[in-house]
Amino acid sequence: MSYDRALTVFSPDGHLFQVDYAMEAVRKGTCAVGVRGKDCVILAVEKKSVLQLQDPRTVRKTAMLDDHVCLGFAGLTADARILIDRARIECQSHRLTVEDPVTVEYITRHIAQIQQKYTQSGGVRPFGISCLLVGFDASTPTIPRLYLTEPSGIFSSWKANAIGRSSKTVREFLEKNYKEDMTVEDTIKLATKSLLEVVQTGAKNIDLAVLEGYGKVRNLTLEDLTTVVSEIEKEKEAEAEKKKSRLAATQASREGMLVEEQEEESTATEVVPEQ
C-alpha cells in the first residue's frame, strides 16, 4: 500500500509522508536565520538572484505582519503568501476586538494552528514552509522574541536558529558562536556571518531586518550589508594569518627540537668509552 497517497493515512512506523515531504520542500528552500541579542533581534534571509528584467521589490522573503512582528520563511513562496495574508488579518482582527496588538507568541500559535489543520484533513496538503517570527511584545518592549513554526504545526521559541537549505550547518555555526547579551552590531555580524556559510555571492543576495524595540524596524541597505561583509572578510583574513603564523612557529619549534636531538645523538656516538 502507498501510504503517501492520502494525507490522513499513517504509515506502519507512525509517519505522515505528506508532512515529511513538506519538510523536504523546506530543506530545499532558501536559507533564513534568526538571532536574538540583548535588546534586539535579527532576521537574515537568503535572496535568489533577480533576473535582469525583474523588479527586485516583488521578490521578498520577509514580511511585516504588524508594526512589531516580522516573518521570514523557507519553502514554497506561494504557500507563504497565503499564510502571511491570514496572519495579517488575524493581527488586525485582534487589534479591533481586544484593542491590543498581538504578542509574538500568539500570532506564532495562530500560524502553527493553521499549519496543523492542514495535516489532518482529507483533500488538502500541508503548507510547504517553515517560518521564523521575530519581534517585541507591547507588555515587554525590551525583550526580543524569536519563534519557529514547522509544516507539522509545531512551534517553539529559540535564541538563534536557521531554516532552509544547509540549515544544519548554519545551526552548528550558531551553536559554536552564539553568546548571551550581544550588542546590535555583534548580533548583525553573527547573523550575516552564519548566512555567509551558505551564501557564496556576498551581500547582494542577503536581506536583513533589524528590530531594536517595539515598533522599531529597519532593513539594512546594500551599502550597509557590504560594509558588514567586508569587515567579516577582513576578520577571516586576520584569523587565517594568525593561524598560518602559529603553524609556522609550531613547525619551526619542531624542526629545532629535531636538530637538537640529532646533535645529541651525534655527540653521544663521538664519545669513545675508556678501556
Image (spheres, rainbow, N blue to C red):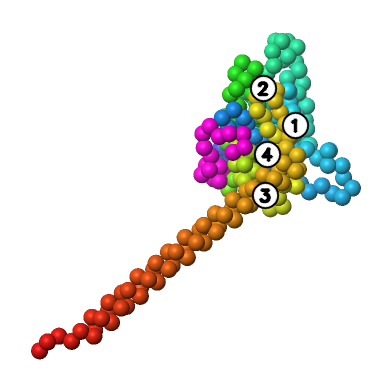
Query: Residue 63 has which mark?
Result: 1
x, y percent for residue 52: 87, 50
Residue located beneath label 2 in the image: 214
Q: Is residue 18 magenta?
A: no
Residue located beneath label 3 in the image: 230
Residue that appears at 56% across and 42% down: 174
Q: What residue type is disc 1 on?
A: Ala
- Which segment is the magenta one? 171-186
Residue 270 image-quadrant placement: bottom left
**Mark 4 or mark 2, whichever is nearer to me:** 2
Q: CA distance from mark 1 to mark 2?
A: 16 Å
Q: Secondary structure at mark 4?
A: strand
Which numbered disc, 3 or 1, marks the residue that appears first in the sequence? 1
Q: CA distance from mark 3 to mark 2?
A: 30 Å
Q: Secondary structure at mark 1?
A: strand
Question: Are the residues flagged by discs 3 and 1 in contact, CB closer than 8 Å?
Answer: no
**Mark 3 or mark 2, whichever is nearer to me:** 3
Residue located beneath label 4 in the image: 44
Residue 125 image-quadrant placement: top right
Which numbered disc, 1 or 4, marks the residue that appears first in the sequence? 4
Residue that appears at 60% across and 18% down: 140
x, y percent for residue 196: 65, 48
x, y percent for residue 244: 52, 62
Q: Nearer the viewer, residue 79 or 118?
A: 79
Which numbered disc, 4 or 2, marks the residue that appears first in the sequence? 4
Residue that appears at 73% across and 19% down: 91
Q: What residue type is disc 3 on?
A: Ser
Residue sitting at the far top:
98
